[in-house]
Image: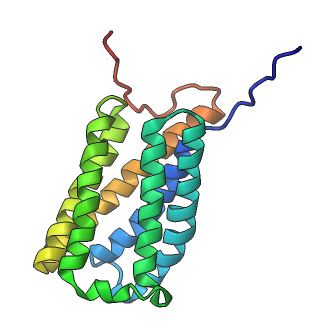
Amino acid sequence: MAEAKSIPLADPAPLGLSGFAITTFVLSLINAGLLKLSDIAAVIGLAVFYGGIAQLLAGMWEFRNGNTFGATAFTSYGAFWLSFAALLIPGFGASAALTSGGAIGSYLLGWTIFTLILTIGTFRLNGALVTVFILLLVTFALLTIGAYTGAAAITHIGGYIGIATAVAAWYTAAAGILSAVSGGKVVLPTYPFVRMS
């Protein structure tokens, strides 16, 4: 009996990183004060379909690839964007939480703690992901402080760090895409860490 050949799967990481990057970018423009808060509707569609569903799917495909880190990160942040969209969509009845700095602060604090855990994990992977996650950790921490204290200036700084986070995520996504279309050649370096045995 002939053995069944496994079908090679594309790397889902560039998709997940891209969905994360653009959604983070647009929300961060609002947090930084570069777009008006009334422009938040532009985030909802991204948060549901690209940052949310597409990233969630990337996480599921990472499970198939046996990548625990990627599966956990993409699935979780996909769920983050879906939950964030739910806070903004009136039909969900959750928008009242947006008026409570303590509620939003606690929501963001939970994501800060989770991001810290993943950030530690990136130090076993590569420098590009370390950069993305350190910037994301700082973004979440600043947004958490801004929400708890009501200090708009801290939220604005968090927005600018969020923009930098998006740029780092786009770079990491581009590195994966360009490597795939170049037959595995390194076009943009991600600075992988050498594991000592």
Residue 8 visible somewhere in the drawing: yes
Is residue 157 among what the camera can see? no
The quarter of the picture where residue 140 lies is bottom left
Q: Residue at x 47, y 85 (%)?
A: 92
Residue furthest right as drawn: 1
Relative to residue 131, is residue 77 depicted above or below? below
Look at 27% across and 73% down and name the residue there: 32
How far across and how far down the image is residue 185, in percent? Answer: 57, 25
Front position in the image: 29 or 97: 97
Q: In the rendered view, how is the structure colored? A: rainbow
Task: Name the residue located 32 percent from the left edge and 28 percent from the top edge.
Answer: 124
40 lies left or right of 51: left
* Image spot of residue 136 (x, y percent): 29, 54
Residue 91 in percent (x, y) is at: 50, 89
Q: Considering the image in quadrants, where does the C terminus appear? A: top left
Residue located farthest toward the top when viewing the structure as drawn: 197
Is 121 situated above or below 1?
A: below
* Quadrant of residue 28 within the rendered picture: bottom left
User: What x and y, as percent, mark residue 183?
Assistant: 65, 26
Comparing 26 with 1, the one in front is: 1
Q: Is residue 131 left or right of residue 102?
A: right
